[in-house]
Image (cartoon, coloured by chain):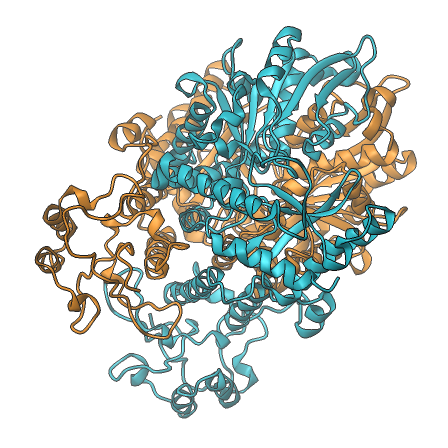
Chain colours: A cyan, B orange
Amino acid sequence: MASPSSGFWPFGAEEGSAAAESPGTARAWCQVAQKFTGGIGNKLCALLYGDAEKPADPGARAAPGAAEPRPSCPACTCDKKPCGCRRADVNYAFLHSTDLLPACNGEAATLSFLQDVVDILLQYVVKSFDRSTKVIDFHYPNELLQEYNWELAEQPQTLEEILLNCRTTLKYAIKTGHPRYFNQLSTGLDMVGLAADWLTSAANTNMFTYEIAPVFVLLEYVTLRKMREMVGWPGGCGDGIFSPGGAISNMYAMLIARFKMFPEVKEKGMAAIPRLVAFTSEHSHFSVKKGAAALGIGTDIKMPNGFVPFLVSATAGTTVYGAFDPLIAIADICKKYKIWMHVDGAWGGGLLMSRKHKWKLNGVERANSVTWNPHKMMGVPLQCSALLVREEVSPKILAALVLSDILLLTVLDVFFICVTVTLFFLFSLKGTTGFEAQIDKCLELAEYLYNKIKNREGYEMVFDGKPQHTNVCFWYIPPSLRSMEDNEERMSRLMKVAPVIKARMMEYGTTMVSYQPLGDKVNFFRMVISNPAATHQDIDFLIDEIERLGQDL
Amino acid sequence: MASPSSGFWPFGAEEGSAAAESPGTARAWCQVAQKFTGGIGNKLCALLYGDAEKPADPGARAAPGAAEPRPSCPACTCDKKPCGCRRADVNYAFLHSTDLLPACNGEAATLSFLQDVVDILLQYVVKSFDRSTKVIDFHYPNELLQEYNWELAEQPQTLEEILLNCRTTLKYAIKTGHPRYFNQLSTGLDMVGLAADWLTSAANTNMFTYEIAPVFVLLEYVTLRKMREMVGWPGGCGDGIFSPGGAISNMYAMLIARFKMFPEVKEKGMAAIPRLVAFTSEHSHFSVKKGAAALGIGTDIKMPNGFVPFLVSATAGTTVYGAFDPLIAIADICKKYKIWMHVDGAWGGGLLMSRKHKWKLNGVERANSVTWNPHKMMGVPLQCSALLVREEVSPKILAALVLSDILLLTVLDVFFICVTVTLFFLFSLKGTTGFEAQIDKCLELAEYLYNKIKNREGYEMVFDGKPQHTNVCFWYIPPSLRSMEDNEERMSRLMKVAPVIKARMMEYGTTMVSYQPLGDKVNFFRMVISNPAATHQDIDFLIDEIERLGQDL
């Protein structure tokens, strides 16, 4: 441990340590200086040693001014690996990434650095759940650009600077796990999911084959089978693949459906097969259109003679309204005309975990393929999407497609892991009953919100009836608009209400909820609840906050 | 902190703690039992409290047998948040995921649990760099399936079980950061990359807009601009996008090239435009073909009259040989025929960081688009790919495409973050000079290997001349084959040599290097060096190991 390039300083070294055996004047002063708080110690040390101590390039580590060798590493001598001892000895102001593993003697600095990063993260995590903290500390881009130096330089930064960067990054990040963050379909921060994600990063591998990812391949198999079981395919039969998102899963379904009907498309292209038509509803996710554009089908195709319908993409849980297509009726039509039935359950698939709500997906078991994003309702960290395929005819069509290079498979392998490990752990830890409780709670909260505002003064619902999912869509009508006639002027004023309230929410940082227009409906709030941290109290808070911020509009 | 559902046990509680104020007989015994090591304490406690203490479902937490309330949480009263105090108090055998945040009073359990996960990971990280540990502890699938219970149950597991799962998962995982792991193009485990990945998981957000990811959007901008600068576009002009892998980046390039030449393809599909032809070399990555299949172009298209060439996909660093296409000559042709020039620099792009080696990519600055995967040579954790676009004609074509929904953009947003944060941090911390040193070292090691084996007895090189990248392709010829004539029998015996040696490597777990056939060349070793932890000593070890394991073949 006595390398002069170890980059360690003996600050706070105990008597008898290696450092105490090789004292130097500057170093002795430096040790004293380190007793000051607030980073003053580091600055004083830098002064004492001069700028030469901050090497300009990783190769030039030795301090020219120091005649004696750099003090040896005073790290612990305990047998525990990794040990948590003596972190105070590491002075990041003098360390660079080249001092971390695989650097010789880099172990102590590495452990100390990673532990300090984790401390920052744990602090962030705890804060995320604290209702007294802001959801967001909002600044405009020019403010951030002025306040910090974001330029990427030729010269390396110190570890101290990188820890500062970590803190800055998190300071201005939105706390997506905050109980009052309702802005996206995927909110919340699951602790087991986080742990599994950290593990995946440390394993840093991909999943090409069993050879290089033995355990992960097994976990993938077990997890996908379980998901197919939940869809209702006996014994979890069929096949599946994890992908980096619902849009790609939907595109894969389209690829498979096309390949199954016209396998020659792979070699000969779209020119060799009839014109294809896919059906989907107006409220379906935009990725269905995107997929049709990418695959060369076209987004604007109407059905004339000679055109071949090859796919129906039904939606289980639309993005805005959370509505469910009538899957049984669609299955009947697909069966009659021999069309591939795909169900985009990216958002609604989570309800399969709930005995109380899964009837909304009745008929999904008759689909040929299903997209399901566990990152949405199930607390899996972003991104986690699965495409599940029920194979009836030829065995293992998905595997066949993979082998025939149709799918962009190997690119995606790392997601298998990420998703696999996380989802497997979440499944194990929560059990299906745990997921069920979580999902039922979100739906109950949505119903609570709906019941609370449906007849409340100043609110109008965007669609009739109880929401099928946790999407509650509504306008807040400020007092000044409440007695107005329903004419264009009212519309144009109402249009501006949600954006102003949202902007104020962000400025105060108290809560966040999304808004949008849809068709002829002007901007309305789309509340969704997928955050397991949310409670009735947070719903009440949201309503109060909307009224507080919108009262004067 | 005195909730009966907090799930805490006062094991090892100090005098005066909340727990000590409410003693119970079983609990008192349990405290004593906890002094035993090896998990015996937990088992005794479980016995003392009976099975009722292990609730069957998260709702049924209260212990029916316990008349008195559950002891209150003995967690610390220090002001430090998060505090590292008193982790010994947490008994995971009685805790479930529902006891973690956002559970009421879940803070201490959460911090303790995450810290224990991190301890496991840090131990794994340190081990990864230790040459005396195995690269892999290999088991066949049936062994793993028999030894552990991989089934996903309805009932939740305890946190103890999940920590055990973490350990098991890592025990059988390949240590991709191990200095003797040479199996993939992307090897190594960068400590700053790991830290940034952990941060990204904790931030758990996506990057749709500045609104929800303010800092990340800025980091993305700065990082992509820097990469374009390295490509050679003045001031880093142009546009870019991070994607989950090189194959998707290549597919995006194809999408953009097609859209730019025939914008009507988006609405009307491939049927409305001429037959398209793309050019690429035999050694190019299979994703170019996959992309052509997915986009409806077809993989087997030859160039007759009326067909329109729209794309040349040149390769900078092929997967197997590490070869570089002549980019300047290709640029001239593309210019003459007005064809989109794409450079797949997924593997070779890293050399742009090296003043010594970047000449191999001369001409890349004339490309219309470039794929570059920093997860390969630059130590960024998997997956990190960028597609960079030099826009000459219309401003911000990529942005236009995004708006026009051609790209499957929003699915990928989370990767922006992952990549952005990690890459930004790596850039900042290492500086371009740090990357340069790392890359130059890998190339120097490859040259060392090449020089060592090119004339060594028992080795034959697969291609002539010095490797352009770190790919060194060679056959090991066991003594029994050395005097044989070059006939079919020799070929069929040589074909089996690399697979057997590789299998033995995995069984011993000492090192890993990939092999493959290519065209008429039977199985050969493809050594690649991207692992910053590798040294000359590890190259020597590899050679010795191949000879040790292949001597008798």
Quadrant location of residue A544? bottom right
Q: Is residue B258 left or right of residue B422?
A: right
Closest to the observer, B136 or B53:
B53
Residue B312 image position (x, y, % from top left)? 79, 33
Residue at left offset 67%, top offset 71% = A149
Q: Is residue B262 above or below residue B56?
A: above
Q: Quadrant of residue A28?
A: bottom left
Query: Looking at the image, can residue B274 be seen?
Result: no
* Residue B92, image x, y percentages: 26, 51
Q: Quadrant of residue A345?
A: top right
Residue B413, visible in the rendered structure:
yes
Name above or below for residue B2 compared with residue B455.
below
| Quadrant containing the C terminus of chain A in the rendered view | bottom right
| Image-based side of A291 in relation to A28, left or right | right
Quadrant containing the N terminus of chain A is bottom left
- What is the x, y in percent for residue A550? 69, 61
Look at the picture and state if B130 lies above or below B431: above
Q: Nearer the viewer, residue B60 or B479?
A: B60
